[in-house]
Image (spheres, grey):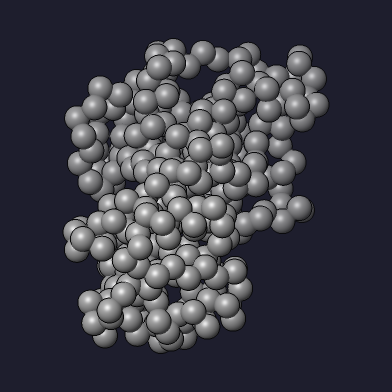
């Protein structure tokens, strides 16, 4: 049974997804034709509210399961406030008839800013300085102007990375499954089948691709071998896209000028992992997503989609559950 069989849609909002009470009150006032249920971030509270819910917004990925779905026969729409959805891709979820949306695109500005922060910290030797490396042992800092940046994944993050590095005077190569808009910040575009062939041209490689069945550890030894010596590698999407053992071997072999990671596999990276020991490897604790504006953007996306849902219109940011993005 779906939401259309109910007299009033019941929309379940999980507070930890960024919905303070004043925003829940705003939703309630904006959509008097729907009932809103706010649940705390715990399994029992969510399970108790699910049987009547036609919409679920912000369920934590770590508690999402086939059992949870079985308690929600009325679901017509599920929304994940994050961009990564790999933990939702299990058979019962993929086969469900409900619409699935996520928070991609709206997280682009802050994550792209973080990618550029990592690039600059590595190209200007700031990371080495903060790790206490003597200046005389550092390589000479480099300019980004007239260098080439390859961006793997041209979604809401990757396109904004391209926009930012283009402003530094870089040439940009984009790699993605889907043809991007013909924007001036991407000089050349290739499909994944050409990724390996284009890597030797890049001075900076930025991974902005989601984890799917096709991208799991897709950046492996062959890709690191193909990269330029003295290049910079940055990952701000998902740690599982990269073969961590292969990356560690490449770092140990002196491949890179610098490596910047906001995500790792495993995550968090164990304290004894060798990647922590290199002054030109900068690791941040999956902190690229939060900003002073991202939660309000998330709220506005949900509010717009609720309006569209109640009008029976297509929703923004639909996820292809079979493809995983």
Which sits in the foreground, 238 or 128?
Answer: 238
Residue 290: where, in percent of width, then height?
56, 43
- Report the label total: 0
Compared to residue 6, the image places residue 277 above or below, namely above
In the image, 315: left or right of 277? Answer: left
Residue shown at the point (61%, 15%) measured from the top left: 141
Query: Which residue lies at the image location 24% right of the left edge and 82% below the top edge?
Result: 5
Q: Is residue 111 left or right of residue 132?
A: left
- Whether residue 323 is visible here, answered yes or no, is no
Height in image: 224 above or below 6?
above
Tell me what residue is drawn at x 41 percent, y 56 percent: 29
In the rendered view, tell whether residue 309 sits above or below residue 249: below
Position of residue 238 measured from the top left corner of the image (x, y, whole percent): 49, 51
| Closer to the camera in the image, 146 or 324 | 324
How far from the left and from the top, in percent, is residue 166?
Answer: 38, 20
Q: Is residue 106 left or right of residue 250?
A: left
Q: Residue at x 66, y 21 (%)?
A: 125
Q: What is the x, y in percent for residue 262? A: 58, 43
Nearer the observer, 30 or 127: 30
Quarter of the image containing the C terminus?
A: bottom left
**Which of the 4 quarters of the picture holds residue 11?**
bottom left
Please say if 80 is above or below 40.
above
Q: Quadrant of the N terminus?
A: bottom left
Question: Does any portion of residue 149 appear in the rendered image?
Answer: yes
């Amino acid at each position: 049974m779906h939401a259309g069989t109910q007299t009033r849609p019941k929309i379940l909002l999980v507070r930890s997804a960024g919905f303070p009470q004043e925003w829940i009150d705003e939703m309630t006032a904006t959509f008097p034709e729907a009932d809103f249920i706010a649940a705390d971030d715990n399994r029992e509270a969510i399970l108790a509210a699910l049987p009547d819910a036609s919409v679920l917004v912000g369920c934590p990925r770590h508690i999402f399961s086939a059992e949870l779905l079985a308690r929600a026969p009325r679901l017509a729409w599920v929304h994940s406030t994050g961009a990564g959805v790999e933990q939702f891709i299990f058979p019962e979820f993929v086969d469900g008839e409900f619409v699935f949306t996520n928070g991609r695109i709206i997280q682009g500005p802050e994550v792209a800013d973080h990618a550029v922060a990592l690039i600059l910290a590595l190209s200007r030797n700031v990371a080495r300085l903060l790790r206490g490396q003597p200046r005389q042992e550092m390589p000479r800092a480099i300019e980004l102007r007239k260098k080439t940046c390859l961006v793997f994944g041209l979604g809401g993050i990757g396109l904004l990375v391209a926009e930012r590095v283009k402003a530094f005077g870089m040439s940009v190569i984009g790699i993605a499954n889907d043809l991007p808009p013909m924007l001036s910040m991407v000089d050349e575009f290739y499909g994944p089948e050409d990724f390996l062939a284009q890597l030797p041209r890049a001075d900076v490689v930025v991974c902005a691709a989601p984890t799917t069945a096709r991208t799991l550890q897709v950046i492996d030894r062959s890709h690191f071998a193909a990269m330029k010596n003295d290049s910079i590698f940055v990952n701000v999407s998902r740690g599982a896209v990269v073969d961590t053992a292969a990356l560690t071997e490449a770092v140990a072999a002196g491949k890179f000028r610098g490596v910047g990671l906001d995500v790792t596999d495993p995550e968090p990276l164990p304290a004894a992992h060798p990647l922590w020991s290199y002054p030109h490897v900068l690791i941040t604790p999956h902190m690229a997503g939060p900003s002073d504006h991202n939660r309000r953007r998330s709220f506005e996306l949900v509010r717009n989609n609720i309006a569209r849902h109640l009008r029976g219109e297509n929703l923004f940011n639909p996820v292809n559950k079979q493809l995983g993005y």
